[in-house]
Structure formats: structure tokens, C-alpha cells
Image (cartoon, rainbow, N blue to C red):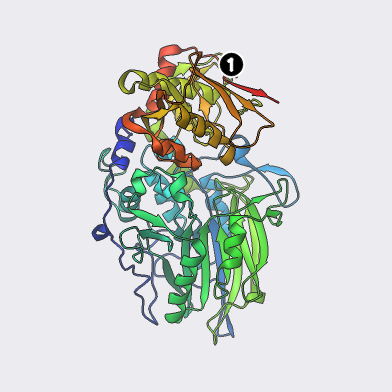
């Protein structure tokens, strides 16, 4: 199932989801009755807590409380191999920067942390924006790996929707990809864990969950409820077409509703897995709490006090915090970095009589996945198998460069690599779509192109730069709309990367809304009524990253995938030199 890239996102973009197609409505979790133990859709193969073994962390005996251990991972993004560069290091508890991450090392550390029956959980973005070894097979390798590691539940993240809701259902339930077919491993059997998303609903039936809102797990006779949430901003950061039939309601509202349902089922011990989080002051221990309050803390402080702890993701930060719930009780809030560099261990006890978490018993630790341990041999072999399957495609040369082409921004905000990608997109859309300019979102450029050792650019390297396989599209904007779009950059704090055909001036001191002037296409000034054909990926054209002006465009034309445009440009123009950073002029 090596991707025929010209078809991958076309298939995802063509998704049409209806309420009647909903496989969970209502979910097994939502229909549990008192006394039931809701298990994952498939028994998780392998350790910990192998099928048939009791879910007992430690030896609780017949004491007044039941001990529970959770191990959480968030924002794994399919990093089966140890991530490189800054993505592969983290500051540890002693303040030292150490190499971290990699599936085989994560498995080794998890074996050390997991007692019999430990519940492994996730907080979203386990897949999507992944390296080629996983993405080439629509992230089936990553989902299979997480099943091997014993994962039971995870919230959906925004990246779980990268290829649309229909594809997420396939990943969860099984079956071969509708366009690319089965992977070399054969027919996909589906995830060995449950995805949860209490705030993901159908637009036409907003009371019907599109993803199971919660699940219940029995541990030594006491039930624990897990509620899943994803950031409500998901529609602005994923491709519109794939989620057009979904709505993402407020996280606090959805969590509180799910919590009430769990209480009605007699489940008092409750955990929220939420794919939303906050930024931190960098350089801190992963166990510190240098959080800059934002959407994550809004959620953490707003969710009902019936929820006992909150595990976060999305912002790729590591922190262990205590906040105050609406009843004034202390409540742990955690996040475990990204790319498999941290496993968050949380221990607590449940009172056998009240069936609730003893808040004073909760402890948490962000355990760094260092590479100074022996990697797990089973996972080493697993990853190597997938590397060999994808090697032929990954190592194919697609071009060459004369020097590093990076994402380092000029004072204007433009970058050499962003400009290069915009030029490639313009060339790919000029003939069929009549494009005159192209604009690239900087968040879609995921890695630098480095010259070492010989300037060769492989398909795998090009893919790492642009892993989303978005569709290139062209729309018509007026000159006034283009001006509004460029002004919008300074509202959302993201500078779009322009093709060489577009130049303009930005006044640093001017107020937002009046910063842009002297817009020109190929040196000719743009007029307000002028009709301009603008190329961008379908994420931007759908209003992604807050660029809502794009949605005013008319005469939509769809062309190749952005990765194909980039690869074809490299093939046609190699060796490629870093473009000059002179398309946006900044004045006082």
C-alpha cells in the first residue's frame, strides 16, 4: 500500500458522512448499565494486562482502597523511529538536555513502569503528520504498535481527522484503504484500543456522538470512566471537506455532560483525556508547572469536580500541574511532551466504599524516554520490518540542493523553504488553474532541507518537509480581498509564504488592519477590483489557520497534491538554491 499520492487526499476529501453511517450511535460506552465493564473494541495483544489476566496494578488485596496506575502518551505523531534534531531531545528532571523517544525505547520504559493491569491511555494526535514509515500506510503501523504497547483508550486529536472522518472510522474498525488497498501486512484489522471524543458530534444531529464519548474499565471490582475530548478549534486546523458533517462543541460542556452520564451509571472515578493544552516557559523540568494559562487551563478549571484528573495534549509541552476544580479541590493536570519522548505515569487509589478517587493519593511523574536503556527487541524488529517495506520509495532521489534551505524566518516572516514551496505550488497550478500567485501556510512546512552530506534530496526527505498531502487548489480573489487576506496574517500571527510573483510592503508600526501596502504581481500594482487567481492548499482554501478570507474565493479549481508539486519542482529545477528573502518589505 505505498501511497499513490495523487489519490490519497482526493479520496479523503471526497468523504461524505451521514448520521446513518455512524457505527457507534449510541456507543458501547454510552449504553453501559450499572455493573457492566466496557472493554476496548478489540482485546489489546501483548503486554501489559494481556487478555485473560486480571487488571491488578500491584497487589491490592482486600484493603480499603484499590491502587490504579495510568501511563499516558500524547502527540506521538507516528514516531516509530527515534526522532532527530530538536524533536529528539528534551530537558530532563535534572535540567540536562538528553536524547529521547523512539518506539523501541518507549516500549522498554513502559515495561519498567507497567505493573500488571496498568492502563495505557493517550491524549490524541497519535497519528497524522507522521514520518513516511507510518504515513505511507495510512498510519496502520503506528496504530498497530500502540496496540502492542497495551493502549486501551485515547482521545481523538485534530490530526486523527487529517484524512477525514471516514478514514478515521476505517483506522478504528478495520478494512483496507479504499484507494491504496491493503498494506504489505494484509487486511487491516482495526485499532486494538478505543478512540474517544465526547465533543465530536454530527451537525444534523448534534446530540449524536460521532465518536464514542467515554469508556468504562473495571479494575479490581471498581470502575473507572475515561472521557475523551479534542480541541474545539479542530475545524480551523484540519481540511474542511473531511469533517464537513461534524461539529466540535465546547470541551467543558461536553465533558460535563459525559461526566453526568457516568455518574448516572454509578461511575465516580473519572479521568479526562483532552487534546488541548497550554504553552510553558521553556527550559524547565518535565515535572514542573511553568504553564502560561490558556485554553488548556480554561478547560481544566471549568470541568466539573466529579472528574478527578485531566491528561492533556496538543501543545507538545511537558508539565505536571495542580489546579483547582469548581468545588475548590486540588486536581492534577498533566501533559507529556510529544513524539514519544515522555511517558506520564499517574498513580492513585480508589476507595472501595465510595468508588471514588482519593484525591490525596494522586501522584504524577513525567518519565523521560531516554535512550540509555536496551530497546525492546520485539519493537525493534517491528519497526525494522516497516522500514524495509517503505525503503524503496523513501530513498528515491527526487532532486538536489546547493545549500541548506530552512524554515528560519527573516524579519518579514518569510523563509527560504516556505518561498521555495510557494514557487513550486505556483508552477504546479499555473497551467491548469491559471494561478498568478501562491501562498503557503508556515505550519505546513515541517522540517528543513539540509545539504549534508551531498545535496541529494530523497522522496522521504521531501515528504518529511510536507507530510500532509493536501490538495492544491486555486480560487479567484479580488484585489481588495487579497489585501484583506494579507492583513489577516497579523491578526492570526502567521505570515503566509509568498511565491516570487507576489510582493508587498508591511509597516511594522501601523495598526493591525492597515499594515499592508504596495501589493504587486510580477511588479504590477494590484487594484481593488482586479480578479486574481490565488493558489494554496485545500487546508488554507477552506479557511484553515484562521485565514477566513480564503473562503470568499470563487471559481475553485483543484489540482495535484502539494507533495507532488514540490517533488516535481525539485526534479525540474535541481540543483535548487535557497530563494532570496525579498518578497515582503518591512518598513517602520
Query: Camera-side residue: 123 or 17?
Result: 17
Residue sticking out furthest to the right: 94
* Percent x, y of residue 212: 38, 64
**Horizontal relation, residue 490 to residue 79: left or right:** right
How many dots with numbers? 1
- Pick the quarter of the image with the C terminus: top right
Q: Kindly identify which residue carries mark 1.
A: 580
Where on the picture, by quarter, is residue 425? top left
238 over 268 or under it: above or below = above
Q: Is residue 501 left or right of residue 164?
A: right
What residue is at 33 percent from the left and 34 percent from the top? 3
Q: Is residue 6 above or below residue 359?
A: above
Residue drawn at (46%, 20%) of the image: 423
Return the x and y of residue 238 as percentages of the image width and height.
43, 44
SS assignment at label 1: loop
Hey, which quadrant is residue 186 in on the image?
top left
Q: Position of residue 587 (x, y in %)?
A: 68, 23
**Location of residue 304 in the rendering, given as x and y in whole percent from the top left corner:** 55, 72
Label 1 crowd (10 A; few <14 / some 14-19 / many >=20): few
Q: Which residue occupies the foreground of this view, 92 or 11?
A: 11
Residue drawn 52% across and 16% down? 401
Front residue of this view, candidates 48 and 124: 124
**Residue 344 visible in the displayed image:** yes
Amino acid at each position: 500500500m505505498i501511497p499513490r499520492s495523487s489519490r490519497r487526499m482526493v479520496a479523503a476529501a471526497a468523504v461524505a458522512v451521514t448520521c446513518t453511517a455512524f457505527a457507534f450511535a449510541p456507543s458501547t460506552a454510552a449504553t453501559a448499565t450499572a455493573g457492566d465493564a466496557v472493554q476496548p473494541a478489540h482485546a489489546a495483544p501483548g503486554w501489559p494486562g494481556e487478555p485473560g489476566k486480571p487488571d491488578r496494578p500491584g497487589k491490592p488485596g482486600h484493603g480499603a482502597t484499590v491502587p490504579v496506575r495510568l501511563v499516558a502518551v500524547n502527540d506521538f505523531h507516528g514516531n516509530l523511529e527515534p526522532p532527530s534534531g530538536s524533536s529528539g531531545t528534551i530537558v530532563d528532571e535534572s535540567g540536562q538536555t538528553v536524547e529521547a523517544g523512539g518506539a523501541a525505547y518507549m516500549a522498554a520504559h513502559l515495561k519498567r513502569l507497567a505493573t500488571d493491569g496498568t492502563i495505557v491511555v493517550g491524549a490524541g494526535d497519535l497519528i497524522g503528520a507522521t514520518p513516511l514509515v507510518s504515513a505511507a500506510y495510512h498510519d496502520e503501523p503506528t496504530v498497530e504498535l500502540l496496540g502492542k504497547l497495551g493502549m486501551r483508550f485515547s482521545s481523538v486529536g485534530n490530526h486523527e481527522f487529517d484524512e477525514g472522518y471516514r478514514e478515521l472510522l476505517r483506522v478504528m474498525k478495520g478494512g483496507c484503504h479504499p484507494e491504496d488497498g491493503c498494506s504489505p501486512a494484509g487486511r487491516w484489522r482495526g485499532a486494538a484500543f478505543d478512540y474517544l471524543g465526547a465533543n465530536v458530534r454530527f451537525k444534523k444531529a448534534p446530540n449524536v456522538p460521532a465518536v464514542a464519548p467515554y469508556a468504562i474499565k473495571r479494575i479490581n471490582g471498581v470502575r473507572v470512566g475515561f472521557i475523551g475530548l479534542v480541541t474545539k478549534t479542530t475545524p480551523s486546523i484540519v481540511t474542511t471537506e473531511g469533517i464537513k458533517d461534524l461539529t466540535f462543541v465546547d470541551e467543558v460542556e461536553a465533558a460535563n455532560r459525559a461526566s453526568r452520564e457516568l455518574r448516572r451509571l454509578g461511575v465516580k472515578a473519572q479521568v479526562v483525556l483532552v487534546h488541548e493544552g497550554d504553552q510553558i516557559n521553556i527550559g524547565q523540568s518535565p515535572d514542573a508547572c511553568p504553564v502560561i494559562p490558556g485554553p488548556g487551563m480554561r478547560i481544566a478549571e471549568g470541568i466539573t469536580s466529579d472528574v478527578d484528573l485531566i491528561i492533556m495534549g496538543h501543545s507538545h509541552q511537558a508539565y505536571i500541574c495542580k489546579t483547582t476544580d469548581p468545588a475548590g479541590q486540588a486536581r492534577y493536570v498533566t501533559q507529556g511532551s510529544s513524539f514519544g519522548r515522555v511517558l506520564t505515569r499517574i498513580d492513585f487509589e480508589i476507595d472501595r466504599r465510595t468508588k471514588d478517587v482519593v484525591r490525596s493519593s494522586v501522584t504524577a511523574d513525567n518519565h523521560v524516554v531516554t535512550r540509555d536503556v536496551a530497546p525492546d527487541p520485539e519493537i525493534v524488529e517491528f519497526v525494522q520490518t516497516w522500514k524495509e517495506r517503505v525503503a524503496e520509495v523513501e530513498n528515491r532521489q527526487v532532486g538536489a540542493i546547493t545549500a541548506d534551505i530552512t524554515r528560519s524566518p527573516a524579519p518579514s516572516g518569510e523563509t527560504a523553504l516556505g518561498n521555495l514551496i510557494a514557487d513550486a505550488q505556483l508552477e504546479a497550478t499555473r497551467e491548469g488553474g491559471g494561478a498568478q500567485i501562491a501562498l503557503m501556510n508556515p505550519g505546513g512546512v515541517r522540517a528543513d532541507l539540509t545539504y549534508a552530506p551531498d545535496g541529494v534530496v530523497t522522496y522521504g526527505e521531501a515528504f518529511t518537509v510536507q507530510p500532509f498531502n493536501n490538495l492544491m487548489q486555486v480560487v479567484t480573489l479580488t484585489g481588495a480581498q487579497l489585501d484583506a487576506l494579507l492583513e489577516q496574517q497579523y491578526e492570526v500571527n502567521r505570515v503566509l509564504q509568498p511565491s516570487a510573483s507576489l510582493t508587498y510592503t508591511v509597516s511594522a508600526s501601523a495598526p493591525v488592519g492597515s499594515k499592508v501596502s504596495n501589493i504587486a504581481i510580477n511588479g504590477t500594482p494590484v487594484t481593488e477590483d482586479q480578479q486574481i487567481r490565488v493558489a494554496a492548499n485545500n487546508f488554507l482554501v477552506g479557511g484553515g489557520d484562521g485565514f477566513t478570507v480564503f473562503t470568499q474565493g470563487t471559481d475553485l479549481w483543484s489540482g495535484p497534491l502539494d507533495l507532488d508539486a514540490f517533488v516535481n519542482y525539485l526534479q525540474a529545477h535541481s540543483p535548487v538554491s535557497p530563494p532570496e528573502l525579498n518578497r515582503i518589505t518591512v518598513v517602520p
